[in-house]
Image (cartoon, helix red, strand yellow):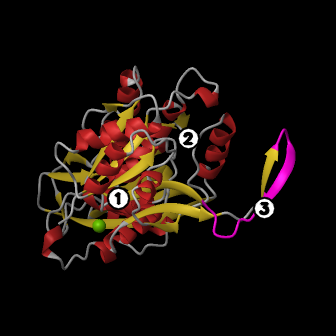
Amino acid sequence: MRRTVALVVAAGTGQRFGSDVPKQYLPLGGVPILRRAVAAFLDHPRIDAVQVVIGPGQDEACATALAGLALPPPVTGGATRQESVRRGLERLSADPPDRVLVHDGGRPLVAAAVIDRVLDALDAGGAAIAALPVTDTLKRADDGTIGATVDRAGLWAAQTPQGFPFPALLDAHRRFADHPATDDASLFEAAGLPVALVPGDPDNIKVTMADDLARAERLLAPSEFRTGMGYDVHRFGPGDHVMLCGVRVPHDRGVVAHSDGDVGLHALTDAILGAIGDGDIGQHFPPSDPRWRGASSDRFLRHAVDRLAARGGRVVNVDVTIVCERPKVGPHRAAMVERMAAILGVGPDRVSVKATTSETLGFTGRAEGLAAQAVATVALR
Ligand code: MG
């Protein structure tokens, strides 16, 4: 199996940006720009590792921005982007991958599909970059006055990622260290090697100016909110506890279930799946499948959150109501909120747990079992 590493270059000082903090460390939708760029590759199933290159003196800013991510220590870059990339490649050469994707740390909105297209082209052999055909009419100008109209036929605007066989790119960088280049494909071209173009994405912008940050914020803004609901029931049976909203609650009965029978998490899983029209928990985790016998239900909820994230979505808020006479939910409510917030990856202020009895009416009133309802609101972009 070929090993593919992403080299994310974030060594810029942000001179063009007009900010004390280099732009790659600024928050975009609450998450540092660099963290978004790195996460796009870390989360991609076809990328094996990510190496970050930062500017001198940026270690602390980098450590803060990338805290908790599974990354090797950053490489310190040089005076130019080209030199920074070369230093990153030299570090990787200690344990050389088969292929490397070079990506600008200032492009936080790179889509998994763009990464896939570059990788698909690499699979076919050679090198490839993401690029967009130029559609505007191009003018060459001096002092604000047009000197000539440039034929745009065959012109493309280069983006990143740019993908290469690792040994060939390292060699090109070593050989052409004195050949000024603003991207890596240029060095491959200088070496006379072919580079394919694959479609980039207009949203894969490079945040260079303050205006770009505002544009990226707009691109990131949710375009749609959706709501889903879920409902679940389990019958009481022998046992000494029930699982409720991810918390073990002592009780003089247990529940009869294939999994751990957590009605709160089951209802919530269905609510999230419902919001994205993605079936229900039984479809994703059939009760007939022995793998889910006694399964801890947090994995069901996590799966639903992953399906949501795969569509570029996130949880806005969830609200769960548990219906039973006993056990009493109140003493466990705070722990339930904390547990569900952790599984969902959101703050506890976005999670609600409520409880009600059914006034001794019906199956919950007769304490034959317990039920839960859940509503989830999600944002998609
Ligand atoms: Mg259930």
**What residue range appears in magenta?**
142-156
- Of 158 and 258, nearer the camera is 158
Figure check: 330 above or below 197: above
Query: Which residue lies under the disc numbered 2?
Result: 29
Residue at the image position 41 percent from the left and 32 percent from the top: 65
- Of 336 and 140, nearer the camera is 140
The location of residue 358, given as percent across then percent down, is: 41, 58
Tell whether position 64 is magenta. Answer: no
- Of 107 and 277, nearer the camera is 107
- Give amino acid for label 2: Gly
Residue at the image position 40 percent from the left and 36 percent from the top: 83
Is the residue marked by circle 2 packed among few (<14), some (14-19), or many (20+) residues within 10 Å? Answer: some
Residue 292, image quadrant: bottom left
What is the distance, in whole Å, between disc 1 and disc 2 at their CAs? 31 Å
Judge from the rendering whether residue 253 lies leftward or rightward of residue 313; answer left or right: left
Figure check: 377 above or below 75: below
* Number of the label disc, if any, that sits on residue 137: 3
Query: Which residue lies under the disc numbered 1?
Result: 164
Judge from the rendering whether residue 230 lies leftward or rightward of residue 261; answer left or right: right
